[in-house]
Amino acid sequence: MQATKAIFALLVLGVALLGYSALAEDPIGAATLTKLSSCPAGGLANGTCYTVTISNCPETAGNFVAAMKVNAPPKGKKTLGAVFFTTGGAGNAYYDGTLGTPDPRDTRCNAQGNCGLLAVQTVNNAGYETIQTNFSDPHHSAAEPVGWLTGPAADGPRALACRFATLVHAVWTNTLRSTTTRPICATGNSAGSAVIAYSLTQYGLGSLSGPGPLLSMVEATSGPPMARIDHGCQKTPPMMTVTCPSGSVLSEGYGVSTALDFIDPAYDGDQDTSSDPEDLCTQQIQNGGNLTLFLHDSVVSDDFAAPNYPRTFVNVVFGDKDLSSAVPQGLEWYNAITSQKAQACVVGAPHTLPSTYEGATQVANDLISFCRLQ
């Protein structure tokens, strides 16, 4: 009996040393990839597009249909790895489409001012397979009005991030042949960085015990804004002195507009123009209170208060023109991470960071420099 107790104690100690995430990872679903006859016009040429039918994510009913666009490196280029690109907000657009509002006077990205395309093309030309996600059904986009954040789900954005983690796992398994000899990396802006952060933390893509792939490097730009949903949905949210723009004091609160557009639909399944009793975040902002649910559903949650990604390098990037809550929210995640990390500030970049030449080149250069096996 004493020997059994000793062995059990050693097992418990071993699990503790590996980190609590080994016990608490949320399960991913399943996905089926279907090749399309062509890709939408515009963006990076010579891509192959797919629909991705995602099923069996806990808390979600029925299937969710997304799309993706894959570009192999140019002919004759050695493949160095693969990079996933995800846009902000609902994530229902391709990264190589027009991000934000282009400045027609600035043609450094291209004649159309499409800086997202510049970022993807630069990484692709360097030898990386680029994989762009688009969380919208190509044949029935109205069914998914808030992209990956289309609920309802009891755990809101945390539960719905299963869709991204499942897609990445399916692509890694089916298209990338479960490779472990080349790096798999990801970048996303704003809520796009949040879905990646959830995948690292809650869905095991930053864990040795996860379903795979183990992401080697993440470039999180302008976020993640869901680092502390409990702070974002407070009536009197905390303020933080941020590093970019240096010394600015910004609120972590979302405000009613952002709550109605992106947070509440994840819980109740509809996107309202005015508040109703089922808009949980908006109700908290307007009436006060502090639902513990929002902490649990955050990236930095009650069960992942100190995220650790043993073989993932996390680079967090902000623009010095961004005065939104995504900046202090992003720092909540950055400050909590106990593994390898860095941050940068891009002069002249707004919240939609890769929509500018400065932001797009920062993203591309970071990925080319740091997307390596750790």
Image (spheres, grey):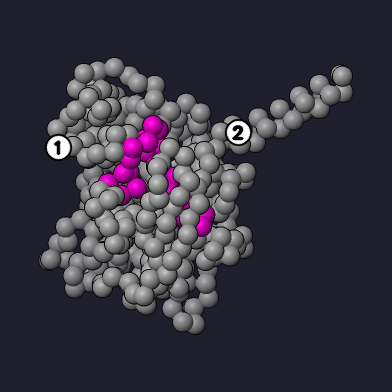
Task: Please tell me whether mark 2 or mark 1 is closer to you in this view.
Answer: 1
Q: Can the viewer see residue 173?
A: yes
**Magenta-span inclusion, residue 169:** yes
Q: Is residue 347 left or right of residue 59?
A: left
> What secondary structure is found at the residue carrying circle 2?
helix
Which residue is depicted at the point 20% across and 56% down? Answer: 100
Which residue is depicted at the point 25% across and 48% down? Answer: 145
The residue stretch that appears in magenta: 146-170
**Magenta-span inclusion, residue 210:** no
- Could you tell me how far apart the alpha carbons at marks 2 and 1 are, in whole angstroms? 40 Å
Image quadrant occupied by the N terminus: top right
Q: Is residue 75 left or right of residue 263?
A: right
Residue underneath mark 1:
273
For residue 23, which numbered disc appears in the image? 2
Percent position of residue 247, x then y: 27, 34
Other residues around mark 1 within 10 Å, as few (<14) / some (14–19) / many (≥20): few
Amino acid type of the residue tagged 1 in the rendering? Thr
Residue at the front extreme of this rendering? 62
User: Residue 8 sits in which quadrant?
Assistant: top right
In the displayed structure, 164 sits above or below 110; it is above
> What secondary structure is found at the residue carrying circle 1?
loop
Percent position of residue 290, x then y: 32, 19
Q: Can the viewer see residue 225?
A: no
Which residue is depicted at the point 32% across and 72% down? Answer: 39
In the displayed structure, 98 sits above or below 206; it is below
User: Residue 236 sits in which quadrant?
Assistant: top left
In the displayed structure, 313 sits above or below 261; it is below
Amino acid type of the residue tagged 2 in the rendering? Leu
Residue at the left extreme of this rendering? 105
